[in-house]
Image: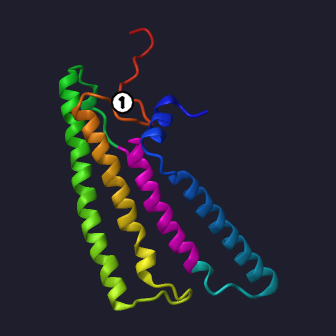
Amino acid sequence: MKPEKERAADRIFPVDEESFIAIALLCSTAVLFLNVVLRYVFSKSLTWAEEFIRYSMIWISFIGSAACFKKGIHFGVDLILRVKSKWFVRAVKIFIETTGLVFCCFLLKFSLDLVFFSKQSGQISPAMQVPLWIVYAVIPFSAALAVIYESVRVLLLCIGAEPPSGLDSEPKEEAGQ
């Protein structure tokens, strides 16, 4: 059963990145297993398997990054958030989320440039013969998701609401204190 904050994140952001990641990992594992069996049992291998696995790992990484923005579980140092002043903690959170939003906007802009350049140049992958702009398309897609998630998180913080988070933002009190 999912914690309450994770369910809230799923209600606010209905995109299901975790299912995509699970399916992509399953497919990558199946192709890798098949290729190992073919190579060591039949002395043959799939020419496209290594490339497929590499590209699916890239997609998994970028979609996973967007999922982390959705739930607010990117790593960070929470030392400053241990201050007892609520307005200061809220201001720091707004600054952090806004900085993340600006970064994601830059990533979106420059990744779109990369995709358009790849499409215009007609580059294709060597083994699978897939246009590389399709492989690179995950970058602006995940950046767009992250921009949406970060925008909502900043807005929620600005109106005084706590955005969904997979981690406790409040430090736990030690027993006996």
Most foreground residue, 32 or 105: 105
At 33% from the left edge and 42% from the top edge, which residue is drawn?
Answer: 76
Secondary structure under tag 1 reads loop
User: Magenta residues, as a range?
Assistant: 51-75
Quarter holding the N terminus is top right
At 25% from the left edge and 67% from the top edge, which residue is drawn?
Answer: 109
Q: Does residue 28 appear left or right of residue 33 in this picture?
A: left
Residue 46 lies, with reference to residue 29, above or below; the image says below
For label 1, count other residues whose C-alpha is less than 10 Å away and answer few (under 14), some (14-19) or many (20+): some
Q: Could you tell me the amino acid type at mark 1? A: Ser
At 50% from the left edge and 54% from the top edge, which residue is drawn?
Answer: 17
How many numbered circles does the render carry?
Answer: 1
Most foreground residue, 26 or 164: 164
Quarter holding the C terminus is top left
**Magenta highlight on residue 10:** no
- Residue receiving disc 1: 169
Residue 120 lies, with reference to residue 58, above or below; the image says below
**Magenta highlight on residue 61:** yes
Specify the quadrant of the image occupied by residue 122.
bottom left
- Toward the right, the furthest residue is 41
Q: How is the image coloured?
A: rainbow
Across and down, in percent, residue 14 comes to 47, 46
Residue 77 lies, with reference to residue 58, above or below; the image says above
Across and down, in percent, residue 62 comes to 43, 61
Most foreground residue, 38 or 120: 120
Across and down, in percent, residue 128 comes to 56, 86
Specify the quadrant of the image occupied by residue 102.
bottom left
Magenta: main secondary structure equals: helix
At 36% from the left edge and 24% from the top edge, which residue is drawn?
Answer: 171
